[in-house]
Each structure stands twice: as C-alpha cells, then as structure tokens.
Image (cartoon, rainbow, N blue to C red):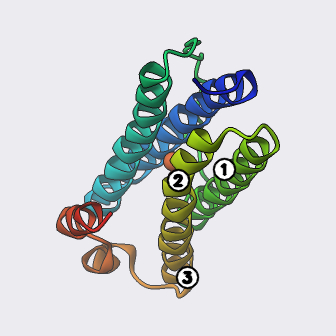
Amino acid sequence: MISDALTKALNGQIASEFTASNHYLAIAAYFALGSLDGWADFFHRQSEEERGHGLKILQFLIDNDAEIHLPAVAEARTDFADALEAVCSALTSERKVSGQFDALAALATENRDYRSLQFLQWFISEQVEEEATMGKLVDLVKSGVNLFEAQQHLPSAEDAEVDAENE
Ligand code: FEO
C-alpha cells in the first residue's frame, strides 16, 4: 500500500506528464510546420517519453492497488514566436516538473511512504538529464546557428535508446 497523500499526488503527476507530452507534441508541430523535420522528430520522441512517464506512474498506482483518476489534459499552444521561445518553453516545463518531483519526494518523506520515495528516485535522476538536454538546445538556438544545419547536432533516436538502456 502507498499513502493516501501520495495516491492523490501521483494521480496529479500523471496529469503533469501528459500535459508535458502534449506540450512537446505542440512544439514538434511548430517545427514540422517550418519544415524543420529533425527538430520535429526530436520533440515528437520527447512527447512519447513524457507519455511513458505518465504510464510508468499509472502502473505504479496499479501495482499498489491504489485509486486511479485519469486527468483531463489542457490544450497546448503551438503559436510560438520563434524557435527560441519554443525551446525555452521546454526548459521551463522541465524545471517545473523537477520541482514537482522534489515536492513529491518531500511529501513521501513526510508520510513515511518509503516505496513511493524509492519509486520517485528514478524521476528525480531523469529530470537532471532532461533539464540538461533542454538547456543545451536553448544554448544551440541562442548561438544563432542555422536551424536546418543544426539538425545534425540534435540528440538522435539512437542516443535516446542508449540512454534508456543505461537507466
Ligand atoms: Fe516527465 Fe521531463 O518530465
């Protein structure tokens, strides 16, 4: 069993993960509309990754026989002023999610919910990596590089697979 507090908070976190997934899908659409298919593919993979995070939390709740409340997901905007605004919004989103996982870990500690606390460790580590990845993209766009040429510098699907194997 996990605590009622974490059951409620983890259901809420599923909403955040699916919202992040929708947000990245919107960024992918923004880049695809500008024929920047490499950028679109990267954010599409990120969207799938965020959906996977939501599903991982859902499975944890199921494994603990906890109540499930699947959330509604808010609309995501696609009308970014430029690529910099789009990637900055991704970094802001990752920082916000990192804060949410820190708060969840604090709540688990407070409630002596050690299995939730242990479960959350993976997400806390993952956030370090995701913030770093988005931070690099912000720096890349800020450098003024040609966005078409920059596509060759984006993390590839193979990079993502290697990362997943190392987790
Ligand atoms: Fe699943 Fe990067 O938040």
Q: Earlier in the sequence, mark 3 or mark 2?
A: 2
Q: What is the CA distance from the residue labelled 1 to the residue labelled 2?
A: 7 Å
Q: Are marks 3 and 1 in contact (CB under 8 Å)?
A: no
Looking at the rendered structure, the secondary structure element under dot 1 is helix
| Three-letter amino acid code of the residue under disc 3 | Asp
Q: Nearer the viewer, residue 27 or 58?
A: 58
Q: Is residue 110 left or right of residue 67?
A: right
Which disc number belongs to residue 139? 3
Residue 26, compared with residue 151, is above or below; it is above
> Is disc 2's CB within 8 Å of ligand 1?
yes
Crowding at dot 1, Cα within 10 Å, few <14 / some 14-19 / many 20+, comes out as: some
Marks 3 and 1, how far apart at CA = 25 Å
Q: Mark 3 vs mark 1: which is more N-terminal?
A: 1
Answer left or right for 114 relative to 61.
Answer: right
Q: Residue furthest right?
A: 110
In this rendering, the answer to whether 157 lies above or below 132 is: above
Label 2 residue SS: helix
Q: Which one is closest to the eye, mark 3 or mark 1?
A: 1
| Residue at left offset 39%, top offset 53% | 43
Mark count? 3
Q: Position of residue 155 (x, y in %)?
A: 30, 71
**Few, some or many C-alpha atoms within 10 Å of disc 3 (few <14, some 14-19, many ≥20)?**
some
Which residue does the numbered mark 2 point to in the structure image? 123
Q: Residue under circle 1?
A: 101
Disc 1 + disc 2, Cβ < 8 Å:
yes
Q: CA distance from mark 3 to mark 2?
A: 24 Å
The kind of residue on which mark 2 rests is: Phe
The picture places residue 103, in percent across and down from the top left corner, at: 77, 48
Q: Is residue 51 left or right of residue 5?
A: left
Q: Nearer the viewer, residue 56 or 80?
A: 56
| Residue beneath the point at 55% across and 69% down | 128
Which disc number belongs to residue 88? Answer: none
